[in-house]
Structure formats: C-alpha cells, structure tokens
Image (cartoon, grey):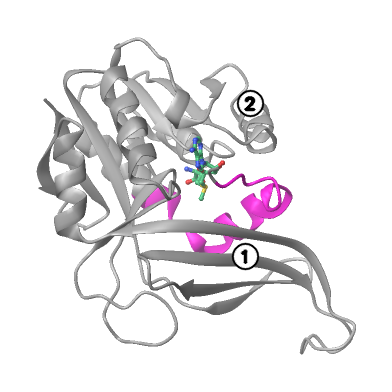
Amino acid sequence: MSDSYEGLSTHYDLIMTSGYYDYDAYARTLLGLIGDRRRLLEIGAGTGLVCEKLLDLAPTGLEITGVDHTESMLDQARRRLGGRAEFVQADLRHLTLPSRFDAAYSVGGVWYFIHDDGAGGDGIDSDEPVLASHLLEEDDNITALSRVHAALKPDGLLALATQGPHRDHERVLPGGLVYSQKIRLAPDNTFTKDYYVRRAAGNGQGGAGEETVAHQRCEYRLYTMEQAERLLKQCGFRSEGVTSDGLFHYLTRQ
Ligand SMILES: C[S@@+](CC[C@H](N)C(=O)[O-])C[C@H]1O[C@@H](n2cnc3c(N)ncnc32)[C@H](O)[C@@H]1O
C-alpha cells in the first residue's frame, strides 16, 4: 500500500504555503527546463499548487494532467484549477495513460531527491543526494516508473525535484497552529515521517491541553544515488543532470 494524504489534506496548503516548499522557485526552474514542451504530466499532483504556479507563470499555454491517488487532495486541486488542468485519480502503479506527454515531473510526489548537508541530527544524514519513494517495494517502483515511461513520448523529460534536509522540526503556522515533523530512519533503507498539526493551548508553549488536529504517517524507501540511477536506467531513463540551482534532477526517456 502506498501513502494516502487523507490525514493531512485539510491542512496541506497551510503547511506547504507557509514555508515548506518554494513553489515559485520550483515552477520557474521547471519552466526553464521544459522549454517548448507543452503536454505535462504531474506525478503526485496533490492539491494542485505546482500546477497552478506553472500555469500562472508560463508565457504560453500548457496542457497539464495531474495524477494522484488521494481523492481529498484532488478535490482541492479541481477547485483550485477549475477547468485549467485535468486531474486523474490513480495510484501510479496502475496508471494507464497513452504515450502523449512531453514531460513528467514530481515535486514531492511519488519520488523526490533529498539533498541533506550531512550536518547530523535526527533525520537523513548524507552528503550525497538520496532518492525517496512513497513506494516501499522495489517491484512497485519499477512498475510505477515504467508507467511514467509509457506515458511519455520518446525523448520525453522526467524531472524530479530536490528537497532540503529531512530533520525533526517544528514551525508556527497561522491561526494558532503548530506544524511538526518527526523522521525515524529504519535499518532497512526506509524511513517514517510523522506530520503533526497541533493547536497550542493557553500560552502556546505546548504540553497539557494541546490538541492534535491532524496527524499523518508516511513511509518511504530510500535509494542511494547509485541505486537510484540503476533503478531509473532499468526503467528506461537516462540521467541528464541537475539544474544549476539544484532544484531538479532531470532525465530523458529512452
Ligand atoms: C507531498 S504531496 C506533493 C503534492 C504536490 N506535488 C505539491 O508539491 O504540493 C505527495 C502526493 O503524492 C501522492 N502519492 C503518494 N503515493 C502515490 C501513488 N502511489 N500514486 C499516486 N499518488 C501518490 C499523495 O497522495 C500526495 O498527494
């Protein structure tokens, strides 16, 4: 089973747009990367935040199809975008879209790279980027990447976003809420990430009376860079490099 975002979906936008992701930066870099490619597939489109930025910033029309398996995320995406983009509810492992896309991208969707700084602390501690996947089984990763491969035209682009350090931390959100995340590494190349949204009681210092308003646990598989390149190559993708700002690893469909 792959992670559903049902538990977090009501608070997702609040967390993400108050400092978690810089959607503007991701969208600008992605637009530079895709050049004149027009038909895009978003992997793990969530509430449509990346899609909206791309459509707002693109100088000419884009045709975006977003795929996600969490209906409560897609409901928000459909409301946000109206008819400007198409959204398909599907688990990526079972995706059956015709081979018509010029590019596919994921910003924290099913796959993403983590570029830590090796500074230690609770979390992932590696100087070299690692690939995180919502899919825990190797076979599922191969199946889902092959589905993306099949949906892309020959020479199509695959762009996977990079995120910064994955550590335990806490952050104040608007409306008297507090976001926190806890990362637990397991010895088998997986990690668990617990997302919490809490309403601070009384003095806002937490503790007694604090109410958890949302909690979600996701489990991820980790691939070293070498393993990731082998996996992606096996699924028909050739690694082309990393954008100069480090925000996307990009590959071409062979
Ligand atoms: C961190 S959210 C990213 C959403 C969006 N790209 C953004 O940047 O805001 C990850 C999304 O991937 C989706 N997801 C995870 N595993 C999936 C799978 N196997 N198939 C389809 N979607 C999946 C989740 O439902 C969730 O909406």
- Above or below, 245 relative to 148: below
The residue nearer to you, when weighing 189 against 98, is 189
Circle 1 — which element? strand
Find the distance from the CA under tag 1 to the CA under tag 2: 24 Å
- Above or below, 118 relative to 178: below
The residue nearer to you, when weighing 139 against 66, is 139
Q: Residue at x 54, y 26 (%)?
A: 90
Q: Is residue 22 left or right of residue 214?
A: left
- Tell me the amino acid under the disc marked 1: Tyr
Question: Residue 238's image quarter?
Answer: top left
Image quadrant containing the N terminus: top right
Q: Which residue is mark 2?
A: 78
Q: Let me know if residue 113 is in the magenta part.
A: no
Res 195 label: 1
Q: Residue at x 50, y 62 (%)?
A: 20
N-term mark: 1 or 2 = 2
Q: Is residue 240 left or right of residue 64?
A: left
Circle 2 — which element? helix
Crowd class of label 2 (few under 14; some 14 to 19; many from 20; radius 10 Å): some
The kind of secondary structure the magenta stretch mainly shows is helix
Residue 174 shows up from this direction: yes
Q: Is residue 79 left or right of residue 147?
A: right
- Tell me the amino acid under the disc marked 2: Arg
- Magenta residues, start to end: 3-25
Q: Residue at x 21, y 30 (%)?
A: 157
Q: Position of residue 181 (x, y in %)?
A: 58, 71
